[in-house]
Image: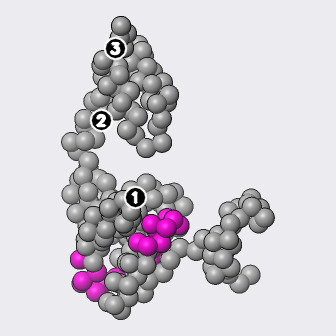
Amino acid sequence: MDYTVAPLEKLCEQFERLPGIGKKTARRLAYYVITRQDNMAEKFASALMEAGSKIRYCSVCQNLTDSEICAVCSDTGRDRSVICVVEDAGDVLAFERTREYKGLYHVLHGAVSPLDGIGPEQIKIKELMARLADGTVNEIIVATNPTVEGEATASYISRLVKSMGIKVTRLAYGIPVGGNLEHADEITLSRALEGRNEL
């Protein structure tokens, strides 16, 4: 005899589809949402529906926004000669938290990964190239993740952009603050040497 509750199982399956969520965590989240006394399920569903209907890609930088043009692209105080290219919208928030970067962004929504069937056409590279056509951009900072896919994407973008005479830079990678040299991998150490600064 099957003692499962079909709607609850369906909810568990949906939570399990989220990245980094396994079967046990999905079940725990589903039970939590359903058993709350403060109408959490309805609030959660309402927030999901609103986000799904109102959030779109910025027509300029492809970041997530609830308007035609995002707040960063609308800010006239930003340096329009520099674009920082990132893989995901969460990366923009990470840079903004530093309060150091004053240029614009471009969100690719992924990285080139031939093994997963993701080529340059499946991410927002074409939109980036269209932004560079007017000649106002002097530098592209490629801030893709330090993974095989991120490196492949950086290399591809670099070849395209350099042919337009625009400076292309890559984020320096190195040893994290509080890190220990003996535990760093070879790639991190070599990047740390390449990106070293004068004291």
User: Relative to 63, does residue 171 appear above or below in the rendering?
Assistant: below
Asked whether residue 11 is in view, the answer is: yes
**Residue at the location (68% across, 71% down)?**
186
Left/right of residue 184 with respect to residue 86 in the rendered view: right
User: Which residue is labeled 3 in the image?
Assistant: 5
Residue beneath the point at 38% across and 84% down = 159
Looking at the image, is 165 positioned above or below residue 65?
below
**One can see residue 107 in this view:** no
Disc 3 marks which amino acid? Answer: Val
Give the residue number, with chain letter if any, for mark 2: 48
The residue under the point 41% across, 72% down is: 153
Is disc 1 placed on a helix, strand or loop?
Answer: loop
How many numbered marks appear? Answer: 3
Whichever of callouts 3 and 1 sits on the residue coming sooner in the sequence is 3
* Cα distance between the residues tagged 1 and 2: 19 Å
Look at the image and give the residue range highlighted in magenta: 130-153
Pick the quarter of the image with the N terminus.
top left
The mark nearer the N terminus, 1 or 2, is 2
Seen from the viewer's position, the closer of residues 170 and 84 is 170
